[in-house]
Amino acid sequence: MEALLTRENLKVPHYAVLTDFSSPSEILIVTFAGLGAGNSCPPFEFVGTLRNFDVKKALVRDPENYAYHGGLRGLSKDIEQTAVYLRDLFKRSGATRIFTLGNCQGGYAAMLFGALAEADGCVVFAPLTFLDRDNRLLYGETRWPEGFERIYTAPSPSPEYYDLCELSALEKLPVTLYYDATHPLDARHSERLLKRFPHIQAERIEGGGHLFVLSLKRRGILDGILRDLCRSV
C-alpha cells in the first residue's frame, strides 16, 4: 500500500511506500529498506537524514520481509511488477532526476530497481550483491540465515535476480558504492560487483564494519554525501 509521508504513517506497519512530492525540487530520492529484525516488518530507512533536504522523497520497504521477491504489499506481486510500479511512481513525482538509495539489503534493492526502473543514479552503502545459496557458500556469507531462507519461500521469487552480477541492466545505471574495505564480508560483496561492472564508482572508507552507514552518520560524512546527491541537477 502507498500513502503520504507523515509521522503518523511512518508508524503504520502495512504501508510499503510513503511519498512526499511537495518539494519544488527536480530531484526525487527513493530509499529502500533492508531486512527487518527477526523477519519482522523492516523500518523505513534514511528518514531522519533526508528530513534535512528539500527534495522529493519516496520511502520503500517490503513489509513481508522477502527482500522484495514477493512484491510490495497491495502494489505488486513480484520483482517485474514492482519495477513497473516504480517507473509509474517516478513519473507521478514530477521529478526529472531520480536517485535510488539503500544500505545492506536495501542497497541490493536500490541497485536492482534503480536499473530495472531506469533511475538516473544510485548510491549504496555496504550492499548485499547476492542472495543465492551458491554464492553464500562460495563467499562465506553466514549472516542472517533465517532471513535468507525466508527469501527463498517468497510467493513469487525471481531467482534470476538473486545475483546482481547477472543483472545486465546495471551496466546503464551510474552507481556510487561506499563500503568499509576492512570488513571482509562486505568487501567480498562489493569487490566482486566492481570487477563485473567497472563503471561503478567505489568509495572505500575505513571504519564502522557492517554498521558502516551509522558510522558515516556519526562522523558527519553521510550528510555530505546526501547533500552532494541533492545538488545533482
Image (cartoon, rainbow, N blue to C red):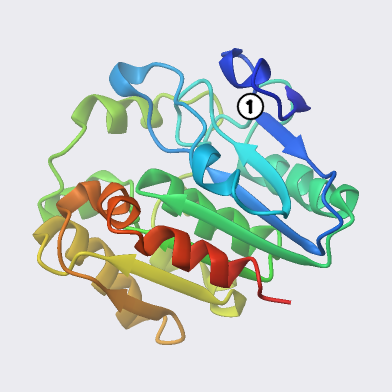
Picture mark count = 1
Residue beneath the point at 41% across and 24% down: 153
The image quarter containing residue 195 is bottom left
* Amino acid type at image mark 1: Ala
In front: 138, or 122?
122
Left or right: residue 52 versus residue 165 is right
Please name the residue that numbered disc 1 is placed on: 16
Residue beneath the point at 85% across and 50% down: 93
Vertical arrangement, residue 32 with respect to residue 116, above or below: above
| x and y, in percent, of residue 1 in the image | 73, 22
| x and y, in percent, of residue 71 in the image | 61, 32
The image quarter containing residue 197 is bottom left
Left or right: residue 18 versus residue 41 is right
Left or right: residue 95 versus residue 207 is right
In front: 184, or 164?
184
Residue beneath the point at 34% across and 67% down: 178
Image quadrant containing the C terminus: bottom right
Residue beneath the point at 28% across and 58% down: 219
> Is residue 134 among what the camera can see?
no
